Image (spheres, rainbow, N blue to C red):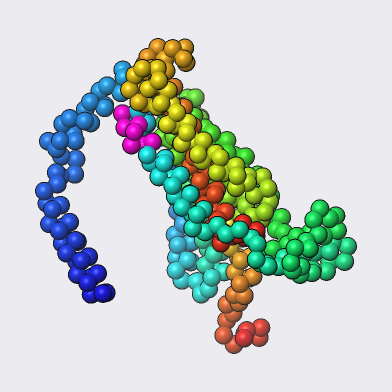
């Protein structure tokens, strides 16, 4: 069986190597991509969409359909992690509680957890002492990371950036919070339900913007149709449409990143973890 | 004035490169995890501060608003790395000690083994 796999891989690799000779050279001016599509994008982006950043306009407007399904792929990844890893915490797991006045740590089994108690605090089984330096630095940085993420999302038209990058930054800020403190504190602020709702809302905003164009009477994802709704002309409406779509992408990416992190770091229990 | 700023920025960038060189040699040659981490942390903070400071100084020799903004952005990078890099080094050392990693000692010294 192993030999069969190796033979298949070798044959596939040889075929790929063999057919690369038919590809156009790197940066070949006579290749189909540089004779038809690229000049059109470079020359017409500003007059078509009023977006200075050609990459963003290609990503979210000329090939908006492709990007919509990329966002769906990300949502599917989050759902797959959830369905494969998540296990409800029902079978008898034990928890550790610390009695604050005496400093004694007790192990509680069954369901008799001291809920809402002032003297008992829950601690993880792989407990790490509170570290002032790490906590302070993370608290200091999280605001800046989130502010920069919003800038990246909103500025995707004019400079490198956009929904995917901004969403990853937003998600990373919450993951940083979870790493610096503990997982339960992060889940209390940004729960699993929030992650699920936000990730599907992001995809819904993208597909909804497309469907709205369809209802108004033009093609799917033809943002020009949104002009009267947004109070702008048809070209500026494309720019605004790209922004709407980018916000949807950012929401989906952020929520899915956090959701996957929760499931992976706690092995699906979401009870305690990194 | 231009000559002076160019000279100062050149000296700063060279001094930063000396730190980078020492840090990268240290990461290869030093005996254990902690001492290598020490040289890596050195490289990130001091080397980066000097080279980036030199570049910021070089940019603002021609005082326009754009150049000042670029210099400010470079300084912001330095500030954030100056905060985060020592924290990361601290956290990694902490994790190493908690995982039970013993610091290296010279063979034959009293505290060793």
Left or right: residue A214 compared with residue A247 = left
For the point 40% across and 12% down, the residue is A233
Res. A55 in view: no
For the point 84% across and 66% down, the residue is A103
User: x and y percent of residue B90 in the render?
Assistant: 62, 60
Left or right: residue A235 compared with residue A170 = left
For the point 47% across and 15% down, the residue is A230
Give the quarter of the figure containing the C terminus of chain A. bottom right
- Residue A144, relative to residue B21: is it above or below? above
For the point 36% across and 26% down, the residue is A221
Magenta segment: A62-68
* Outermost residue toward the right in this view: A101
- Where is residue A60, by image quadrant? top left
User: x and y percent of residue A196 in the render?
Assistant: 55, 44
Q: Nearer the viewer, residue A258 or B107?
A: A258
- Residue A148, relative to residue A216: is it above or below? below
Which secondary structure type mostly characterizes the magenta part of the structure? helix
- Where is residue A93, by image quadrant? bottom right
Q: Nearer the viewer, residue B70 or A84?
A: A84
User: x and y percent of residue A208 in the render?
Assistant: 45, 28
Q: Tell me if residue B42 is in the magenta stretch.
A: no
- Residue A189, relative to residue B31: is it above or below? above
Res. A247 in view: yes
* Outermost residue toward the bottom in this view: B108
Q: Tell me if residue A67 is in the magenta stretch.
A: yes
User: x and y percent of residue A76 in the render?
Assistant: 44, 47
Left or right: residue B50 compared with residue A41 = right
């Amino acid at each position: 069986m192993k030999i069969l796999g190796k033979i298949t891989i070798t044959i596939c690799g040889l075929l790929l190597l063999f057919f690369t000779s038919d590809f156009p050279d790197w940066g070949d001016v006579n290749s189909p991509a540089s004779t038809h599509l690229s000049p059109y994008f470079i020359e017409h982006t500003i007059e078509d969409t009023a977006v200075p950043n050609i990459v963003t306009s290609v990503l979210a407007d000329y090939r908006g359909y492709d990007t919509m399904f990329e966002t769906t792929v990300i949502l599917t990844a989050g759902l797959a992690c959830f369905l494969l890893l998540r296990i409800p915490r029902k079978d008898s797991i034990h928890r550790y509680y610390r009695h604050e006045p005496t400093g004694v740590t007790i192990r509680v089994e069954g369901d008799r957890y001291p809920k809402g108690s002032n003297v008992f605090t829950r601690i993880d089984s792989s407990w790490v002492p509170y570290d002032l330096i790490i906590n302070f630095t993370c608290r200091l940085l999280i605001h800046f990371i989130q502010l920069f993420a919003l800038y990246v999302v909103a500025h995707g038209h004019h400079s490198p950036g956009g929904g995917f990058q901004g969403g990853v930054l937003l998600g990373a800020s919450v993951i940083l919070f979870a790493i610096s403190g503990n997982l339960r504190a992060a889940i209390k602020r940004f729960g699993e339900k929030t992650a699920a709702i936000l990730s599907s809302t992001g995809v819904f905003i993208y597909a909804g913007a497309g469907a709205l164009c369809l209802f108004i009477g033009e093609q799917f994802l033809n943002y020009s149709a949104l002009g009267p709704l947004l109070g702008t002309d048809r070209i500026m409406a494309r720019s605004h449409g790209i922004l709407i779509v980018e916000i949807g992408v950012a929401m989906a990416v952020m929520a899915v990143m956090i959701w996957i992190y929760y499931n992976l770091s706690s092995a699906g229990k979401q009870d305690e973890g990194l | 004035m231009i000559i002076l700023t160019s000279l100062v920025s050149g000296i700063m960038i060279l001094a930063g490169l000396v730190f980078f060189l020492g840090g990268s040699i240290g990461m290869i040659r030093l005996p254990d995890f902690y001492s290598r981490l020490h040289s890596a942390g050195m490289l990130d903070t001091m080397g980066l501060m000097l080279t980036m400071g030199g570049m910021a100084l070089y940019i603002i020799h021609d005082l326009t608003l754009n150049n000042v903004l670029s210099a400010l952005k470079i300084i912001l990078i330095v500030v954030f790395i100056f905060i985060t890099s020592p924290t990361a080094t601290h956290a990694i050392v902490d994790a190493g000690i908690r995982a039970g990693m013993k610091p290296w000692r010279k063979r034959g010294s009293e505290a060793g083994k």
